[in-house]
Image (spheres, helix red, strand yellow):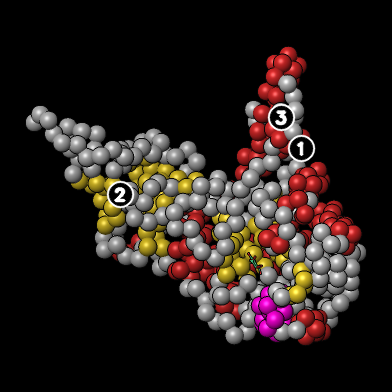
Amino acid sequence: MKIITPIMDTNVKCTSIKNIITILVPLLVLSFCPMHAQEQPNNIKNEDKMQWFKDAKLGIFIHWGLYAVSGIDESWSFFNGYISHEDYLKQTSGFSAKNYDPASWARLIKESGAKYSVITSKHHDGFALWNSKYGHFNAVKSSAAKKDVLSPFVKELRKNNLKVGIYYSLPDWSYGDYTHFLRDSMRYKISGSPKRWNTFLNYYQGQLKELSNTYNPDLYWFDGDWEHSAAEWEAPKVRQMLLDKNPNTILNSRLKGHGDYATPEQGMPITRPKDKYWELCMTMNNSWGFQKNDHDYKTIDQIIGIFTDVIGNGGNLLLDIGPKADGSIPAEQVSILKDLGQWTSKHKEAIYATISGIPKEHFYGPTTLSKDKKTLYLFVKGNPNGEVVVRGLKNKINRIWVVGNGTKLSHKVVGKVYWSHYPGITYVGLPDHVLDEHMTVLALLLDGEVDLYREDGAVIESN
Ligand code: GLC
């Protein structure tokens, strides 16, 4: 993830050292010190604007578009030649949204425990869910729905106090002046037709301006940046344009690096990502959009397992649903969101506004910490047969309880050696009757900030 530092790139290089010392030092101190503050208008610090995102932990992704009609891959089905573009477009007559109930969507998202949602305002196929004045290819002007299906949803999200994220595909494979069309046929190269490219730039940036003026999103979720360079997309200008409108808005990284957080996709990171802010986007089955044939859903235990791995490593999970063309949400997805909601609401103190936990060597499972680092949360999968083990914890434990249940638990430290700092191994007794059906969470209240033994073993020199 790149942070934009315009002052560093331009002013510094072309200014003499003498000038820097005499005239520019105070200016540079101001501009360099809070480097992140520099990239935001009105001096909004990156950490401040990212705080809600960092605390949110769970978001719901929504892929809703024409592709739900036939249940085929979103946009890619025609780009890759599995169906002709012409036939792909015929799906407009089936996009009815006749059972679309944005209020129940938002309620369900709220119930799942998510704090934000990101909806595909326009995927790579170019079909817009709102009534864009740029072009005609949208839900109002070219679909059976004949209505704006984005605005009412945004309104319901706000009503439910959920943050609003707008997914926007940079490529628009249906737009006549966009470079790419099908995998094996491009319309033109920018170098050959800069004028056409400019037409496209005005179009896409116009749409973004429209989205920003109409919805003032809390977050923009770009996609498809791989088709052009940052300079070709005019990425820094677009970033600035969106921040000028709302300095607090967050951009994902898929604007050729000119964003605020990383977006690993589908694959749960195995090692802890180095990015300070990141979000794993993941499908519940194997498809982003609704596909009638795809019943290959992850189980609720697997989803909770992945979710806790994500938050234990300091990230967010953006879990995807794909509503049908009539606007109803498939039953399997509703039930996953409801089950997830039961679990997240029971364990909220261990989830929201926590920070990443301790290294795996100390506890074989995900962990989180309260912001003051004095409460350690252990996520215990399955039935550990009466005992949970924590290694090398130097703190004294003042109290242990089962989150969402309140039962107090006892513990014993084994193997502490009196002649070194090695603190021993902590065994927490965990009776079967307090186990959660999906994943049990324990809270350990420590005598101070968590303190871990990370040294090599020592040999006794005097006994
Ligand atoms: C990929 C795909 C796109 C999907 C997105 C979600 O970029 O191109 O179809 O919407 O991932 O992260």
Tell me, yes or no, whether the highlighted magenta stretch contains residue 70: yes
Q: Which mark is residue 428?
A: none
Kindly report the distance in space between the C-alpha atoms of the residues bearing marks 1 and 2.
Answer: 46 Å
Quarter that holds the C terminus? top left
Q: Give me the residue at 34% from left, 55% from top.
A: 364
Pick the residue in front: 279 or 22: 22
Is residue 396 visible in this depiction of the protein?
A: no
Pick the residue in front: 429 or 20: 20
Amino acid residing under circle 3: Lys
The residue wearing badge 1 is: 41
Kindly report the distance in space between the C-alpha atoms of the residues bearing marks 2 and 3.
Answer: 52 Å
Amino acid residing under circle 2: Val
The residue wearing badge 2 is: 390
Drawn side of residue 270 relative to residue 322, left or right: left
Q: Position of residue 288 (x, y in %)?
A: 63, 72
Quarter of the rendering containing residue 22? top right
| Quadrant location, ligand no. 1 | bottom right
Q: Give me the residue at 71% from left, 35% from top.
A: 9
The residue wearing badge 3 is: 13
Q: Give me the residue at 52% from left, 69% from top.
A: 339
Kindly report the distance in space between the C-alpha atoms of the residues bearing marks 3 and 1.
Answer: 23 Å
The region drawn magenta spans 67-82
Is there a contact, CB below 8 Å, between mark 3 and mark 1? no
Amino acid residing under circle 1: Pro
Drawn side of residue 59 relative to residue 232, left or right: left
Pick the residue in front: 280 or 165: 280
Q: Position of residue 358 (x, y in %)?
A: 40, 46
